[in-house]
Image: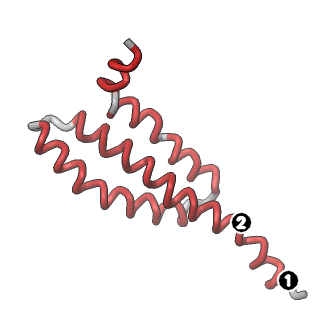
Amino acid sequence: MTRSATQSRSAWPAIAARTGLALLGGYAFTYAFTAAFARLLPADPVDAVTTASLLSFVVYLLFILWAYAATSLRRVLTGVGVAIPLAIIGFWPQLMEVLG
């Protein structure tokens, strides 16, 4: 077997991981970003949600492109991890209702 055939086979797990993180992690990031942006935008609630929802399509596209362009898989995981603080910001009132 040639060296190039071996290298292409070993690349498939990394491609599958990036694809999964791009699709599922990008969705989680975009969902959290949209909620946080709609909450922090100084506008009428209806206008803030509409603006954040329209922007979410661009954010999701950019996250998917970035997931493949990132130099390492660890950076993509860090990007997905940023969704946690964004979700806390975006869903703070609902979180307070559940907790107390």
- Which residue is depicted at the point 11% across and 44% down? 47
Q: Secondary structure at mark 2?
A: helix
**The disc labelled 1 sits on which kind of residue?**
Arg
75 in relation to 97, above or below: below
Circle number at residue 42: none
- Which residue is depicted at the point 38% across and 20% down? 98
The residue furthest left is 44
Rate crowding at label 2 as few (under 14), some (14 to 19) or many (20 or more) other CA atoms within 10 Å. Answer: few
Of residue 63 and residue 27, the one placed in the foreground of this image is 27
The residue furthest front is 98
Q: Is residue 78 left or right of residue 43?
A: right
Circle number at residue 13: 2
Of residue 9 and residue 46, the one placed in the foreground of this image is 46
Nearer the viewer's eye, disc 1 or disc 2? 2
- Which residue is depicted at the point 51% across and 47% down? 79
- Give the mark nearer the N terminus: 1 vs 2: 1
Tag count in the figure? 2
- Residue 35 occupies which quadrant of the picture? top left
Q: Which residue is mark 1?
A: 3
Q: Secondary structure at mark 1?
A: helix
- Which residue is depicted at the point 46% across and 54% down? 26
Please provide percent x and percent y for residue 83.
Answer: 45, 41
Rate crowding at label 1 as few (under 14), some (14 to 19) or many (20 or more) other CA atoms within 10 Å. Answer: few
Please provide percent x and percent y for residue 49.
Answer: 19, 44
**The disc labelled 2 sits on which kind of residue?**
Pro
71 in relation to 35, above or below: below
